[in-house]
Amino acid sequence: MGLTVFDAGVIIGFLDSTDSHHAEAHKALSDADTRNDRLVVPASAFAEILVGPSREGTAAVRAVRDLADRVPIDIEPLGAEIAIAAAAIRARYRSLKLPDALVIATADHLDADHLVTTDRKWPSRSMLKLRASISKS
């Protein structure tokens, strides 16, 4: 049993069957479930996930929240330690956006085994000095 942290794009891809990342996202969640991993989404990424459903209304938001409860996916709060680490990551890698730095910092803070993203432009695991493997869906 390990711990897998997901970036917003993976969950968005999983939820939307027309998304270009749908098949890979489904596989990533299935693989984590097969390993019996604890599944985590940073609160910042959860907010990103809820943007589209929020445009559709409260029922769509409730459906996503219900899915997170059923799977279950834990929502990791953003604390000062993660925020400080994310700022340092963002400062070091100027092409990396702050939401991505928050996901990476959360995975590092939790000592995650796996970090899954749809973003192909992230620095490598060794550059980031992460223990977690980085899978790009």
Image: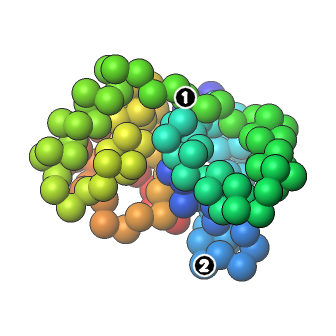
Give the quarter of the figure containing the N terminus. top right
Q: Nearer the viewer, residue 35 or 49?
A: 49
Residue 68 at x, y percent in the picture: 75, 40
Residue 76 marker: 1
Query: Which residue sits at x=32%, y=29%?
Result: 83
How packed mark 1 is, by other alpha carbons closer than 10 Å (few <14, some 14-19, many 20 or more), is: some
Asked where in the image residue 130 lies, by quadrant, the reply is: top left
Query: Which residue sits at x=37%, y=68%?
Result: 120
Q: CA distance from mark 2 to mark 1?
A: 26 Å
Residue 20 marker: 2
Residue 114 lies left or right of residue 25; in this view the side is left
Q: Amino acid at mark 1?
A: Glu
Residue 128 at x, y percent in the picture: 23, 44
Q: How many marks?
A: 2
Residue 9 lies left or right of residue 128; in this view the side is right
In what element is the residue under mark 2?
loop
Q: Residue furthest top?
A: 80
Q: If you read the primary sequence from the N terminus, does the residue marked by circle 2 or circle 1 appear first? A: 2
Asked where in the image residue 33 lies, by quadrant, the reply is: top right
Residue 28 at x, y percent in the picture: 62, 56
Q: Nearer the viewer, residue 59 or 21?
A: 59
